[in-house]
Image (cartoon, rainbow, N blue to C red):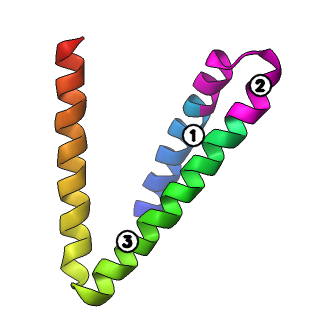
Amino acid sequence: LLFGLYGIYAAATEGIAKAWITNIAHGKETATAVGFYSSCQSVAALFASVIAAFCWRYVGSDSVFILAAALTMIATLWIARVRSVN
């Protein structure tokens, strides 16, 4: 069930991000912009996995979920603050 929900989420968000990048990139630089976006996304996933593995091994499995929840809360508050300023 969760795997299916993740598939729906990925299908709904990946295309939108790449379409947005395509709209803001200039003519010949579109492929470079999409490639750079994908590269940044992959490097961020690598770093997140390394940090999660480190926390899981040396701090405990609960720490990974607590860290994810804390970072999600920080991101939510930051987005709410940015939206209220604009």
Q: Quote the CA–CA distance across marks 2 and 3.
A: 33 Å
Amino acid type, mark 3: Ile
Q: Where 25 falls versus 49 (above or below)?
A: above
10 Å neighbourhood of mark 2: few (<14), some, or many (≥20)?
few
Q: In terms of sequence position, does the residue under pointer 2 or pointer 3 come before the other?
A: 2
Please name the predominant secondary structure of the magenta segment in the image.
helix
Q: According to the image, label 3 marks what residue?
A: 51
Amino acid type, mark 2: Glu
Residue at (77, 25) in percent of width and height: 29
Across and down, in percent, residue 27 comes to: 79, 16
Q: Quote the CA–CA distance across marks 1 and 3.
A: 24 Å
Q: Nearer the viewer, mark 1 or mark 2?
A: 2
Residue at (51, 37) in percent of width and height: 13
Query: What stretch of residues is rendered in magenta?
Result: 18-33
10 Å neighbourhood of mark 3: few (<14), some, or many (≥20)?
few
Q: Is residue 67 visible from the viewing direction of this image?
A: yes
Q: According to the image, label 2 marks what residue?
A: 29
Residue at (25, 42) in percent of width and height: 75
